[in-house]
Amino acid sequence: MKKFPLGLAACTAALLLAACGGSEGEPTATEDSASEATPVVEEAATVNPAADDVSTVDGTTLADFTGDPAAGEKVFMQCRSCHVVEPGVNRVGPSLAGIVGHSAGVVAGYNYSSANANSGITWTPEKLNQYLENPRRVMRGTKMAFAGLRNGQDRADVIAYLSSARN
């Protein structure tokens, strides 16, 4: 029988982190929808933006884009290894059913990081736009290992999808 250097749990965690585009503590490059590598922006500040601050690193706002739920469902495929939009179904991450307009850190049955549970954030479409660009910039200490969606249109599409998937 061949032995593997990592246990099954460690391999599974590594695969999930790879699927999300990063690993804990290591910046990665992501690809936007045009398949061009985009470097991760280094975090200059040492504190989270205020809960009502929705500024993005790239300077865009959600109003700069028109979200397409069908395109967002396709982009959301990279999130499915950790999240679903079915209510009450938590995976590695919490269910995102009805997330738009709700407070962060309150999905029943999910064990949130203290950073998420105590953030004071309400997931408005604009705050989701900021968060999805670079989750660790917005919420230092989050358990989410996803590096972010650098393409503003992808973010707008995912937000349109999540808004349409309200349950």
Image (cartoon, rainbow, N blue to C red):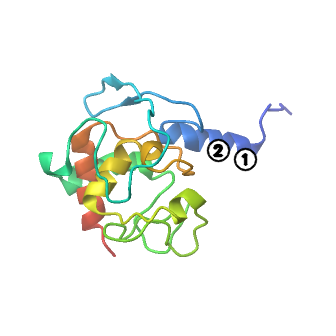
Left/right placement of residue 128 relative to residue 20 reads left
Q: Are marks 1 and 2 in contact (CB under 8 Å)?
A: yes
In percent of width and height, residue 51 lies at: 38, 59
In the structure shown, which secondary structural element does the residue marked by tag 2 occupy?
helix
Reply above or below: 106 against 137.
below
Looking at the picture, tell me which residue is in the foreground, 148 or 120.
120
In percent of width and height, residue 2 lies at: 83, 31
Q: Which residue shows up at 79% across the image and 32% down it? A: 4
Residue ID for mark 1: 9
Type of amino acid at the residue the image marks with label 1: Ala
Q: Can see residue 65?
A: no
Placement of the C terminus among the 4 image quadrants: bottom left
Type of amino acid at the residue the image marks with label 2: Ala
Q: Can see residue 149?
A: yes
Q: Which mark is residue 160?
A: none
Placement of the N terminus among the 4 image quadrants: top right
The answer to which quarter of the image holds residue 148 is: top left
Looking at the picture, tell me which residue is in the foreground, 133 or 72.
133
Q: Which residue shows up at 26% across the image and 56% down it? A: 126
Left/right placement of residue 141 relative to residue 34 reads right
Q: Which mark is residue 13?
A: 2
Q: How many marks?
A: 2
In the structure shown, which secondary structural element does the residue marked by tag 1 occupy?
helix
Q: Which residue shows up at 55% across the image and 57% down it? A: 115
The Cα atoms of the two marked residues, 1 and 2, are separated by 6 Å
Left/right placement of residue 1 relative to residue 10 reads right
